[in-house]
């Protein structure tokens, strides 16, 4: 169904039981209508750990970009919802995550970034999440992590993986355009903030996060960088991060931000937690890690956060898929795990 007003096309597109009003140009609207018939087939293929032909990946990236352009920097999400941490290309463990948490669209998901790099199947992992986002746009929220970056992916594996599988860099470039449009944070029931890394000394309120221009490569400093790179720590004030980007922030900063913005707590990812999850600062900050046996050698378990309401939530823990149940590609050339 289309509505016309002053040359703008308002298209109501149905994805299963989920209608979505999107504001698009005529050209974009036609592209979305054509692609909607392909999504189920793409999802079925990707779930078998197959990557899409280049032309289909390009269409998918353009498709999802149209959806992401509608989303604000702090995207509102309603409970119940399941929040996930880093995935890092561990495709078979992502499938295990869906077994534990429930399949979309039955389960509503927030993924807090770092979909790519280090794991064997960054391309298939990211493509599956994009296809699910396209198919169920209001049931999959994708946040940007510090690895959703041109610079980082050229060092830690995703760029080389795209080159090896496609023979050229264009698919990687298309994915990077999507990276630039990923939202920075999600706000659950107006009271739980989800962000990949942490806080920034330049954004004391949610409204300040909402005003950031996010459509760019991650800069080396500034609030966009800080939200994706910062870490909580036992510090009394803002401290330069040993990572070389972002800051360390402590309980005082966290409590002040939570109180000022009317939050229950902050949920983030970005740091390996051997138990899959960790609560800090009297429960005002929670780290969730969703890549079990990280880099296929760390031995950690993973977790996802099932939030039924702001004060009713629980963790679901899971271990890595055994090696005999996953396909391991040939020996890698670049030591991405270092």
Image (tube, rainbow, N blue to C red):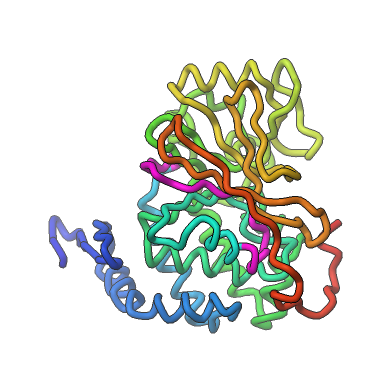
- Closer to the camera in the image, 296 or 270: 296
Seen in the picture, residue 87 relative to 1 is either above or below; the reply is above
Bounds of the magenta segment: 73-93
Q: Residue at x 47, y 59 (%)?
A: 102
Is residue 78 rendered magenta in the image?
yes
Question: Looking at the rendering, which quadrant does residue 238 occupy?
Answer: top right
| Viewer can see residue 151 | no
Question: Looking at the rendering, which quadrant does residue 256 occupy?
Answer: top right
| Quarter the C terminus occupies | bottom right
In-image side of 259 versus 272 (left or right): left
Residue 205 percent across, percent down from the top left: 48, 24
| Viewer can see residue 329 | yes
- Closer to the camera in the image, 226 or 217: 226
Residue 153 percent across, percent down from the top left: 70, 60
Q: Residue at x 54, y 69 (%)?
A: 127
Seen in the picture, residue 7 relative to 280 is either above or below; the reply is below
Residue 82 percent across, percent down from the top left: 48, 48
In-image side of 236 versus 286 (left or right): right
- Closer to the camera in the image, 165 or 106: 106
Q: Residue at x 38, y 67 (%)?
A: 135
| Quarter the N terminus occupies | bottom left
Question: Looking at the rendering, which quadrant does residue 244 occupy?
Answer: top right
Q: Residue at x 62, y 19 (%)?
A: 253
Seen in the picture, residue 275 relative to 170 is either above or below; the reply is above
């Amino acid at each position: 169904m289309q509505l016309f007003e002053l040359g703008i096309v308002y298209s109501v597109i149905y994805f299963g039981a989920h209608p979505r009003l999107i504001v698009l140009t005529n050209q974009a609207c036609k592209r979305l209508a054509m692609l909607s018939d392909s999504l189920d087939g793409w999802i079925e293929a990707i779930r078998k750990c197959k990557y899409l032909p280049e032309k289909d990946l390009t269409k998918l990236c353009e498709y999802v970009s149209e959806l992401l352009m509608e989303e604000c920097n702090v995207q509102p999400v309603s409970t119940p919802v399941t929040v996930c941490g880093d995935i890092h290309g561990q495709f078979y463990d992502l499938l295990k995550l869906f077994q534990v948490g429930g399949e979309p669209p039955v389960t509503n998901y927030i993924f807090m970034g770092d979909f790519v790099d280090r794991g064997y199947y960054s391309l298939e992992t990211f493509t599956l999440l994009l296809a699910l986002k396209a198919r169920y746009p209001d049931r999959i929220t994708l946040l940007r992590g510090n690895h959703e970056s041109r610079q980082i992916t050229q060092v830690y594996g995703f760029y080389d993986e795209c080159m090896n599988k496609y023979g050229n860099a264009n698919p990687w470039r298309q994915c990077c355009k999507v990276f630039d449009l990923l939202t920075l944070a999600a706000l659950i029931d107006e009271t739980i903030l989800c962000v990949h890394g942490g806080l920034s000394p330049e954004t004391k309120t949610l409204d300040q996060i909402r005003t950031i221009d996010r459509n760019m490569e991650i800069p080396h400093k500034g609030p966009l960088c800080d939200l994706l790179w910062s870490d909580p720590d036992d510090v009394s004030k803002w401290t330069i991060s040993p990572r070389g980007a972002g800051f360390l922030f402590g309980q005082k900063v966290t409590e002040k931000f939570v109180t000022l913005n009317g939050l229950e707590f902050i949920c983030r990812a970005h740091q390996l937690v051997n138990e899959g999850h960790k609560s800090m600062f009297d429960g005002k900050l929670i780290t969730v890690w969703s890549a079990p046996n990280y880099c296929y050698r760390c031995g950690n378990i993973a977790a996802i956060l099932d939030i039924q309401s702001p004060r009713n939530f629980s963790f679901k823990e899971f271990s890595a898929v055994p090696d005999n149940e996953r396909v391991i590609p040939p020996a890698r050339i670049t030591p991405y795990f270092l």
